[in-house]
Image: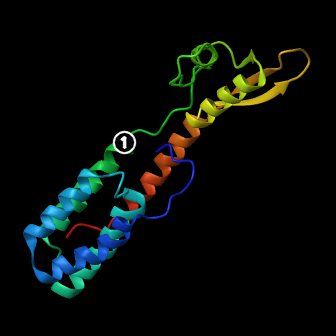
Amino acid sequence: RHARYRREPSLSEKALLPLLKAIVAGGAQDDLARVLAFVQEAPSEFRLDECQVPCLNAIIPWSRKKFGKTPAEIAHWLATVRQRLSDVTRHQPEPPADWVRPAEVACKCQLCGQLNTFLADARNEFGRIAAREDLRRHLLDKIDRHLCDVKHTLDRSRSPFALVFTKTTGSYERALKQYESDCRLLQSLPATE
């Protein structure tokens, strides 16, 4: 859920719907159960939004039209996906109540320690860390990599220059966006028979 850029569907994701249709058409329930178990055990390879929900939305009407019913294995998959989405949409994310932000920069250097301390500070919206250029680049790389809830400017008024930080609500905004997306996915699922 920390993906900053939308990735292309994997070959596995692209192949899933035709594979499921072939298995259902062939009447191979054991194979269908094995494939669906594999799909559910690999949620990062078969994402709900880009793969599982679209497959369910395609295969259920297809199987009902072609065979007059939905195979039990697919109905179980639908129920599992519906439950997973119901669980993650049970509570809407709340905006932060203070200035504490996730402080999860996984680096043990002094500057990253200062950043984590600043992020965990409930009272301060603003902070600054003075450092030479290579260390500032290191810090900015860690901020980008860990999606820290800060924006920054460079204060050049004295040497060494300082990064001036302002806390943001990025984590909350990403969580809210994911929540809204999951709500839409849940609403888009086909009805059970």
Residue type of the residue flagged with mark 1: Arg
Residue 13 shows in this picture: yes
11 vs 184: above or below: below
Q: Where does residue 117 sit, x and y in percent of width and height?
A: 59, 13
Q: Residue at x 34, y 58 (%)?
A: 46
Q: Nearer the viewer, residue 86 or 175?
A: 175
Which one is in front, 102 or 123?
102
Residue at 21 percent across and 87 percent down: it is 66
Drawn side of residue 63 relative to residue 139, left or right = left
- Is label 1 in a helix, a strand or a loop? loop
Image location of residue 39, percent across then percent down: 25, 58
Up/down of 62 relative to 113, above or below: below
Give the mark count. Answer: 1
Q: Which residue is mark 1?
A: 90
In the rendered view, does 7 fall on the left or right side of 57? Answer: right
Q: Can you say which quadrant of the picture contains the C terminus?
A: bottom left
Residue at 17%, 60% (x, y): give it. Answer: 76
User: Would you place residue 3 above or below residue 35 in this image?
Assistant: above
Image location (x, y in percent) of residue 176: 52, 43
Examine the image and state in which quarter residue 78 appears. Answer: bottom left
Q: Position of residue 68 (x, y in %)?
A: 16, 83
